[in-house]
Amino acid sequence: MQSVLGAGAAAAVPASLLSGCSVSSKAGTAASTGSPARQFSPSAEITFPKGFFWGAATASYQIEGAWNEDGKGESIWDRFVHTPGRIKNGDNGDVACDSYHRWREDIALLRAMNLTSYRFSLSWPRVQPSGAGAVNAKGVEYYSRLVDALLEARIRPFVTLYHWDLPQALDESGGWLNRDTAARFADYAQAVVQALGDRVTDWMLFNEPSVFTYSGYLEGTHAPGHKSILEFLRATHVVNLAQGEGFRALNATRPGVRVGTAFNMSACEPATGSDEDRLAAERAHAITNVWFIEPALRGRYPQAFTFLPETAMGIKSGDMEKTRAPLDFIGINLYYRTVIAAPGAMERATHTQEWLFPANMGGGHEGPITDIGWEVWPKSLHDIVMRITRDYKRPVIEITENGCAYNDRPDATGTIHDQRRIAYHRDYLAALAQAMSEGADVRGYHAWSLMDNFEWADGFSQRFGLAYVDYKTQKRTIKESGRWYAKVAAENRVTPKSE
Ligand code: FCB
């Protein structure tokens, strides 16, 4: 699933937003090179603001392993990967990158890359094995040690509470279809902030709520593997309630914490200039980019559907007050763009889904394609950052994920020459810098990922890391991209390709 807006965004930003911008470029801003995919290749050095966070991101299930150690409960992902046929090549995250035991090596990687922010997630069933009640002391100690070591290395711990590994026990009582899960989530948030909130100040409630509800409840490709549009819609409402409840729980327990969510986003471009395609693109923007932001910031659902099945979604009176959460920042995970066309009248008349949601969404095909099949389109990052800046009165933004899958392997000398990954990050950073120079308040950038890891339904077949992981030995090797990124972080600037 994927958002809207074309080139007009920048022009629509009021002039007052343009003052105080501190991104500077020695020769103007990022320049156009003609090719749409490359239009943000920097032609000159770009300097980021002092104190800008340079980071990398991971997620518990994708790196930790130790799936049943030290009292950890089963998660829906443990159950899903152990079900035959769900994951490419029958892979699973039982061991993954073994970070539960090798976290010191991971911190060494962050240090070697000069990073100042580490976005990682907590495994809910490691903290609360059955999703309710007392915490598992060993699980909490693991995260506590990690946080201490990060702080000692002067790296900000930037913590996601939920990156998809719901306790299996909660799924058995309905998971995200059960309103009670919102209350369980708030209890979990409270327990965690009680344990770590003396040292962790920056939190994300959810990672990509529209992906885990869509892929888990409609597409069926992620845990728990259901396929129902009504379940999907209902799950999104429970997650919106949980976002509100979780926000309040964190703030009540530790006033002064900074709380956001990492939303998956992508610029939604209409396939043609027709009114139908434009309207369809707006629907796509509503469901992909702001379905979990509008309830939080404005207490309402955006107009994605021809009609909102409120009863089927389980929306009760008073709920839209409960979903409110004045988030302290908007986290953006972005990889590509989405191109949207309106379905024809026949399609709308004969398919329930097209009738309810008349927008056919797909990836673009003009830019280079990464190994996972996603188009490289830096403009998408610029456009969505500007749209969010414009629509929500210049909120604080953190880029919580951005990266690419290229499966380059070590050469005879052990070097991993992943020049395409360097080009990807360089161009997306130039696009981001352009948005910042137009007034966006962006505080940090997190590459996905610190190291290669378990890529959900794709198993280990897709490598997104700045560091290579040899899964047989668990040896980590910083790729050429990781070395390049280390220089960017140390110098706080991105230089053109020739340098
Ligand atoms: C995002 C997920 C992250 C990772 C990247 C490639 O959708 O948040 O866990 O899988 O995609």
Image (spheres, helix red, strand yellow):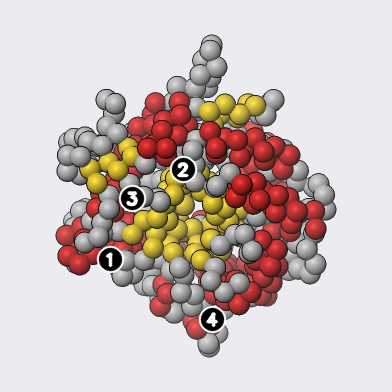
Q: Is residue 172 visible?
A: no
Q: Pick out the residue farthest to the top.
A: 412
Splitting the image into 4 quarters, where does residue 14 fall?
bottom left
Q: Residue at x 47, y 32 (%)?
A: 482
Q: How many marks?
A: 4
Q: Which residue is mark 3?
A: 49
Q: Are marks 2 and 1 in contact (CB under 8 Å)?
A: no
Residue 443 marker: none
First in residue order: circle 4 vs circle 2? 4
Q: Is residue 479 left or right of residue 40?
A: right
Q: For the residue marked with disc 2, what is the amino acid?
A: Ala
Q: Which class describes the residues within 10 Å of circle 2: few (<14), some (14-19), or many (20+)?
A: many
Q: Is residue 342 left or right of residue 85?
A: left
Q: In the displayed structure, would residue 456 be above or below residue 223?
A: above
Q: Which class describes the residues within 10 Å of circle 4: few (<14), some (14-19), or many (20+)?
A: some
Measured from the top left, where is residue 289 in percent x and y? Answer: 40, 61
The answer as to whether callout 3 falls within 8 Å of ligand 1 is no
Q: Which residue is mark 1?
A: 390
First in residue order: circle 3 vs circle 4? 3
Q: In the displayed structure, would residue 428 be above or below residue 204?
A: above
In the picture, which quadrant includes the N terminus? bottom left
**Viewer-side residue, 111 vs 340:** 111
Q: Residue at x 46, y 74 (%)?
A: 326
Q: Residue at x 40, y 66 (%)?
A: 290
Q: Are marks 3 and 4 in contact (CB under 8 Å)?
A: no
Q: Which residue is mark 4?
A: 322
**Viewer-side residue, 199 vs 342:** 199
Q: Which residue is mark 2?
A: 447
